Every structure is written in C-alpha cells, then in structure tokens.
Image (cartoon, rainbow, N blue to C red):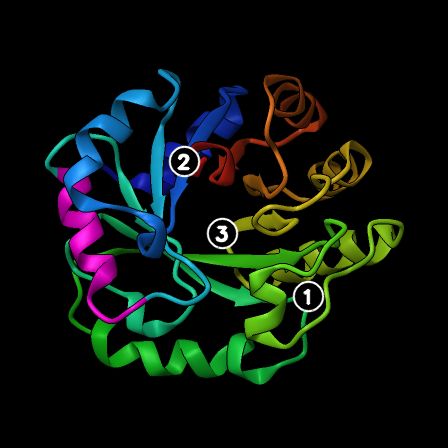
C-alpha cells in the first residue's frame, strides 16, 4: 500500500496541488455512490470521509460503498473516535488546537487508541485549526469551542507552528462546513510561509476561482464538501 502521507508531502515539495472531496456519511446514500463519484472533478486526488456527528456504523458503510467505485485513497476525517473504521486507507489523527476543550485536544484521541493499537490504518497526526467562516458551524457546536477570528493572523500562524513543533505532520485550516466565506488568502500565505509541512485548507470554498486563489496563496490541498452535497 502506498504511503499516503509521503505522497502528500512529496506533492507539496514539488508544488503539485491536491484536491480532496469530503463526504459526510450522514448525508450520503450508499446506493448512489457510483453516480456521485462520477460527478466529482477529474483532478480529485483523495476522498475524505467524516462528519461532526455520524450515526453508528454509517461511516463504515459509506467507506465500503465508495471503495467499490474508486481507487482513490479514502481517508477518515472523523468528528469522534466512533467514526474510525478499518475499511478506510488512512486516518487524519486530529487535534483541535484552536480550542481549549480537552475532549478534542486529547480525550478523543485516547479513546481511539483501543481501535488503533493493532490497526492497519495509516495514521497521520494533524493539527486542526478552526477559523471563523462567518457563521456557526457544526465543529463549533459539537466541540463547544470558538473559531479564531480571521483578523488574528499572528495567532493563527503561531497555532499552526505550535502544531508543527509538537510533531503534527499536517496543518488543516478549517472555516467550517457551509461557511459564508473561506479562509483568507492572507492567512493561507502567512501560515504556509511559516511552516515546513503540508497545508490543507477547507470550508466555504465553492468555486474554481476560490479554489485557485487558495492554491496560489499556498494551500497544498483543498477540501470541498458542501458544494458537491448540493
């Protein structure tokens, strides 16, 4: 099996831009997986699966149906430890660094260990940073944490660097599902300039113009979800 983190890191080094489509299991109909996957952009490099709150066993069913119709890597983007399934290829091992709720800084991670101790999943430590996207998002409600305002660029950069210094392999800037506006180009540029690991950006990106702007500012991977749910 390919080393998915190594592939992302190599693409970042070469300046190759990646696109992940995020699928929320609670909004996904397994029988329509084939038709759905035919509609995603040709340049899609990864499928992310996860949501802030997902019904029991729904993630595994979603992953299984997706893998019947694509050879793209399927990576878990879980809202909590119950969404972990061996049927995926890799797991973003998320720590919500923008908040101060211990449940999402470390408690959920500890709860996941029993499932991951002998797992074949590729585990990718990821610093998850919630940025204000203009409206309350599901992550904010579930985690009971506040996003960092977009004007606090220095705080966002420092949080990203703290993630890298603590051993995270990816930085994920998230404006939230259905955000009114995405993470600004200034934030992306300043974070990318400061860190030496790949940068993922998601939330509120609905158009090719917004996607290209984020790439130009320094994003290595863009995550889009709401646009394709609709």
Quarter where residue 155 is shown? bottom right
Q: Which residues are magenta?
A: 55-67
Q: Which mark is residue 5?
A: none
Residue 177 on the magenta span: no
Residue at point 66%, 58% (across, down): 130
The CA distance from mark 3 to mark 1 is 16 Å
Instruction: Give the image location of residue 72, x and y in percent.
Output: 25, 31
Give the side of residue 20 with respect to residue 12, left or right. left
Asked whether the beta carbons under mark 3 and mark 2 sit within 8 Å of each other, the answer is no
The CA distance from mark 3 to mark 2 is 20 Å
Give the side of residue 79 with respect to residue 97, left or right. left
- Helix, strand or loop status at disc 3: loop
Asked whether the beta carbons under mark 2 and mark 1 sit within 8 Å of each other, the answer is no
Q: Main secondary structure of the magenta part?
A: helix
Quarter where residue 230 is shown? top left
- Foreground of the two, 129 or 41: 41
> Can you identify the residue that label 3 sits on?
169
Residue 64 on the magenta span: yes
> Can you identify the residue that label 2 sits on?
21
Mark 3 or mark 1, which is nearer to you?
1
> Can you identify the residue that label 1 sits on?
98
Mark 3 or mark 2, which is nearer to you?
2
């Amino acid at each position: 099996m390919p080393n998915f983190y190594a592939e992302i890191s190599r693409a970042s080094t070469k300046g190759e831009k990646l696109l992940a489509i995020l699928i929320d299991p609670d909004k996904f109909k397994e029988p329509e997986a084939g038709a759905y996957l035919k509609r995603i952009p040709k340049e899609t490099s990864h499928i992310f699966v996860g949501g802030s709150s997902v019904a029991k066993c729904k993630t595994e069913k979603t992953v299984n149906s997706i893998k019947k119709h694509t050879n793209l890597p399927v990576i878990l983007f879980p809202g909590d430890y119950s969404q972990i399934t061996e049927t995926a290829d890799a797991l973003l091992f998320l720590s919500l660094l923008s908040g101060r709720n211990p449940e999402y800084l470390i408690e959920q991670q500890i709860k996941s260990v029993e499932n991951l101790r002998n797992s074949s999943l590729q585990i990718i430590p990821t610093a998850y940073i919630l940025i204000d996207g203009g409206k309350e998002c599901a992550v904010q409600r579930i985690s009971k944490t506040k996003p960092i305002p977009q004007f606090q660029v220095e705080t966002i950069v420092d949080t990203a660097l703290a993630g890298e210094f603590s051993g995270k392999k990816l930085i994920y800037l998230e404006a939230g599902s259905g955000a009114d506006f995405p993470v600004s180009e200034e934030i992306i540029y300043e974070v990318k300039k400061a860190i030496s690991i790949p940068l993922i950006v998601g939330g509120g990106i609905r158009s090719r113009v917004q996607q290209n702007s984020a790439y130009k500012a320094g994003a290595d991977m863009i995550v889009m979800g709401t646009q394709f749910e609709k």
